[in-house]
Structures are given as structure tokens and as C-alpha cells.
Image (cartoon, rainbow, N blue to C red):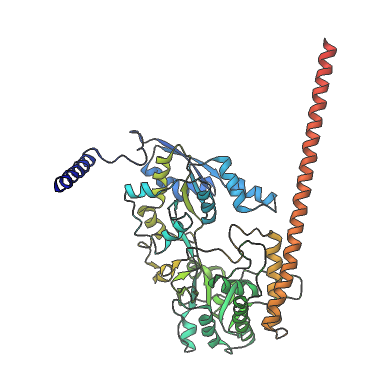
Amino acid sequence: MVRKWKIALLLTLVVAMLSGCFGEKPVLEELGKDGKGKIKVVYYSEEGFYSDYGNSFNVKYPDIEFEVVDQQEMYRELQDNEDADYREEMRKFLDKHKPDVLMVDLSTMEKMVQEGKLYNLDAVIAQEQFDLEEYMPGLIDMIRAKGGGSLYGLAPSIFTSVIFYNAELFREHNIDLPRNKMTWQELLDLSNRFAGIGSGENQIYGYYEQYGSLDQLLQNIARGSSLRLFDAKGEKLVFDTDSWKQALKIATDALRSKAAYAQPYNDGNEHVFMGDDDLFFKGKAAMIIGGPWMVSQFKNRMMWDKEAKEIDWGMVTAPVDPANPDESSYSMLHEVFAIAADSPNKRAAWEFVKFVNGQEMAKAASRSSRGSLPTRNQYMKEIDGKSTEPFYLLRPKAEFDSMWGGENVKVPMDFHQEFSNIMAKEMQAVVDNKKSVEEAAAAIQAEGEAALLKAREAEKARKAAKNSAEGDSGKAAEENKTEDSGSAEATTSEGD
């Protein structure tokens, strides 16, 4: 028995020695000696691709050529077809052009993994010991969650919102500064300490909802608590629930007390979108939610806005769900780079994906922000002298979909704006003490169901009309073809 064990051990050692001598067979064949290769890659535009990645990559790999597939073609298709689904059009676009390297969002990646269209990166990452440790906590888990536990893509950048605050306003009124990992309830309770400071045009608000109407505040609160508007099948609206009522109460209480400000709903059929963040930069609001691009506003706003004031600013994490205080629903991946499963150029494609997601590009990204942040969080410790900890402190929520739902929820575009108007109208009624939270929630549920039915019927009618028009067009083309064929035969007969 001992002799057999020794023989087995000896054989194991021999195999290990042979592997060391001859080297492990590469998962992907190496590039040729000349280093040449060709990659077809999808990006927003050819010019943008070379500016962001292509030129830098070609310094290291001068003999690898690119064919850039411009996404503007797909966006034009979406503009021409109001009922088109973005992710479906994206998949059609990718099927048509068959790129080696795909740039997709997480939901599209997940669907393509299920369809067997993406290359599993785990083996090549393990063999080449590609460093995944420098990525921000939770990032790789977030991507794996959409790949059934495997890694089918890598993301060089992430978009994360935080709460920016005006430190001077807090000091002036002896109010404690905001802190990391506050819930929305805690943030708006803090905001309430500003209620009653000033009046009219000189009113000071604790929190300012930068974009949209009252419903935008509700949507932000819902996002923090991962609330959903539809059931799992995406068929029924589910607003009249305890969770939505609680979010509705938090929002309307803050608006009524003037702890928070959002544009009021007007008496017309829709609310007005201003996209104006003047209150914060005029020193009349203490907190605002925003992304990394806000930093440039602190530097440059006064150059073109005469009413803007210099702000002693700080930032903390975006509000968290009390059930998951270490996760953020405000971190999103828009650019996941993946490799097509049937790509004939996998090695060149992997060299590009590896480069884009490597340390060199992360260092470059840390020196110039495009409104997003490098996912390798070792290289951007400060922005304008402020610690970037609030951007990276929370793990991105692995399983996240917006309140509108994920891949399984097919909602007509007409419904989004109509439902936002319904929410804003009913919220205004609560703020004005004309309705209770329970009455408003019931009204939003009923009116929302009616709006959803109407939008789906309108979408169905448009598709039927389009199919009919295409059928008539095809029929006419076939008739013309038949007539042309008949004319040709008659001419031939006459010639004979």
C-alpha cells in the first residue's frame, strides 16, 4: 500500500516537472511572431474609440488593427421606431455586425451569456494571473452575478452617485455634517433641521432634488430601497403597497416641511423639467445628489454663472437601504467589455480587453474623469483634494434593476412619462394636504393601471399598422416584380 502511494507521488512529481519544463498549454493561442491581429469592436463612435482606448492600445500593439462598429447606426434605428426595445435592438445590432469585442451593459451581457454568445474569461484570467484584487469591493461579484457565477466581461469604469454638501451652510447653522451610510429617512431628517431657515427667495433647504419634479425625489428614495413597480412577470403594477406608501410619506413629509425642494407639479397635464441646480450653487440648498462630473462644476460654475457662489464642499455616500447598509443601488456599469464566443480573433480581443481593464488605463483614467470613475480604486485616492472614499466605500448592488424592472418587464415608452406625471400630481395633492398618503397611493395604482393598459393598446395598434403597411409594401413589390417579369417575357416573345 505504501509502495503504491510512493509511486503515485513520484508520478505526480514527474508530471509537475514536465509541465514546468515544457510550459502549460495556453488557453488562447499566442499572437503570431509579428504581433499582428485584427479586432472588430463596438463603440459609441470611431473617433471616441481611438481617443479613449485605441490610440493608447496601438502604442503597445502597433500591428493590431481595429474595425470600429459605430453604435450611432443603432441609435438612428431606435429614433425611427418609437416602440423599439433598446436591448433587443442592441442584440440585433451585434448579431448583424458580429464584433470580436462587445461593449454592453450588464443586462445585455446576462442575456447573451444565457444564449451562449460570450466567451468565458475565467480560464485565461487564471492562467495569466490577471489581477482582480485591485477592483473596488463587490465589482467582480456584480459582474459574476450576471454571468451565472462566471466572468464573461470586465468593466474599466463605473458611475456612482454620492451626496454632495455645502459645509459652510452646516457650520453657519450649527447643524451636524452628513455622514456615510445614511438612509433616506436619516438624510431627510437631517435636512429638516434647515426647515424654517429663511423664507421666500431666501429660503434655505436641506436637500435639493436637482432634476425633474416631485416624483424624481420619490424615484430616488425608491431606488435606495430597491422598490419595484411591477410584479416578477412584469404584467401588473404594484404601487399600492406598504413599502411604496412609506417612501411616499418620507418624500411628501420632507417637501411639505420645506426640508427638501423639488419643482412643484403645475396645474397642466405634465410637470416641467428644468434640469436646474441653481439652488445648490446659489448657497440655498445644503445637499444634492450627483456623480463625479459635479466636481468640475465646483471649479467652473462661477465662470459662466454670475449668481453661483464658491462652495466649501464635501461628499458622503448616497443613501443606503437599511436592510443592506454596505451596498449601493446608485452604482451602475454602462460599459462591460466582453468577447464573442465565436470570435476567430480571441487572442487579440483578449489583449485589448486586458489592456482596457489593466493598471495602465486605470492610472490614466484617474488623471482625467469622463463623468465615471476607474473600477480599480487604487489610483484615484483624491479628487480636487477631497477623498474619494464615498465613491468606493459601498459595494455595488449585485442584483440591481431600476424600479421599472429588468429584462422581463416590457413597458411601452409612452407609459414612463404618463406615470411620472401621475405620481407628481398625486404627490402634490399630499403635500398640499388635499389627500392622505393612502388615498394618493390608491389613486396612483388605479390611474397607473389605466395608463399602462392604454399604452399597451396603443403600442399594439402601432405594431399592427406597421405590419400591415410592410405587408402591403411587400405585396406591391411582388406585384411589380410579376408585372416586370411578364413584360420581359412579352418582349422576348415579340423578338422571337
Q: Return the residue nearer the eye: 312 or 230.
A: 230
Q: Is residue 213 visible?
A: no
Furthest residue in direction top, as rendered: 496
Left or right of 446, for residue 111: left
Q: Return the residue nearer the eye: 145 or 471.
A: 145
271 versus 438 height, above or below: above
Q: Quadrant of residue 202?
A: bottom right
Q: Position of residue 294 (x, y in %)?
A: 50, 68
Q: Position of residue 31 (x, y in %)?
A: 36, 37
Residue at 59% x, 75% y is 209
Left or right of 486, for residue 431: left
170 versus 338 height, above or below: below
Q: Looking at the figure, which quarter contains the C terminus?
A: top right
Q: Is residue 363 visible?
A: yes
Left or right of 490, for residue 131: left
176 versus 16 height, above or below: below
Q: Return the residue nearer the eye: 283 or 258.
A: 258
User: Total label count?
Assistant: 0
481 versus 169 height, above or below: above
Q: Position of residue 403 (x, y in %)?
A: 59, 67
Q: Quadrant of residue 363?
A: bottom left
Q: Position of residue 42 (x, y in %)?
A: 52, 46
